[in-house]
Image (spheres, rainbow, N blue to C red):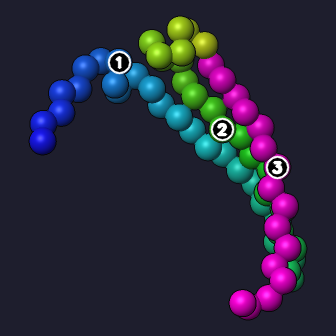
Amino acid sequence: MFSRLNSMDAAYEPGNFALGYKKNKTSLMIGMYSSTISEYLVGSTYIIPYVGFRYNLGKL
């Protein structure tokens, strides 16, 4: 199987940044997904924030 890369394939660069806190069975994470300027996104930068909350019920 062969693949051919061009400049548009290498232009997309996603990123993920997050900060979190964990204590006992509870954890909270706040972060953002982002993408750099590329030919795919027509010169735009997208930033999508997210919040994650998790509670561990125990070992299953």
**Mark 3 or 1, nearer chain start:** 1
Identify the residue at horizontal 47%, vertical 16% (top origin).
Answer: 40
**Mark 2 or 1, nearer chain start:** 1
**Amino acid on which the number 2 mark rests in the picture:** Tyr
Residue matched to label 2: 33
Identify the residue at horizontal 66%, vertical 23% (top origin).
Answer: 46
**Mark 2 or 3, nearer chain start:** 2
**Amino acid on which the number 3 mark rests in the picture:** Val
- Measured in 3D between alpha carbons, the distance from the residue under mark 3 to the one under mark 1, in whole angstroms, is 31 Å
For this orientation, the residue located farthest to the top is 42
Q: Quadrant of the N terminus?
A: top left
Residue 57 at x, y percent in the picture: 84, 83
- Measured in 3D between alpha carbons, the distance from the residue under mark 2 to the one under mark 3, in whole angstroms, is 11 Å
Q: Quadrant of residue 48?
A: top right
Task: Name the disc covering residue 51, or none.
Answer: 3
At mark 2, the secondary structure is strand
Toward the viewer: 4 or 43?
A: 4
Residue 39 vs residue 35: left or right?
left
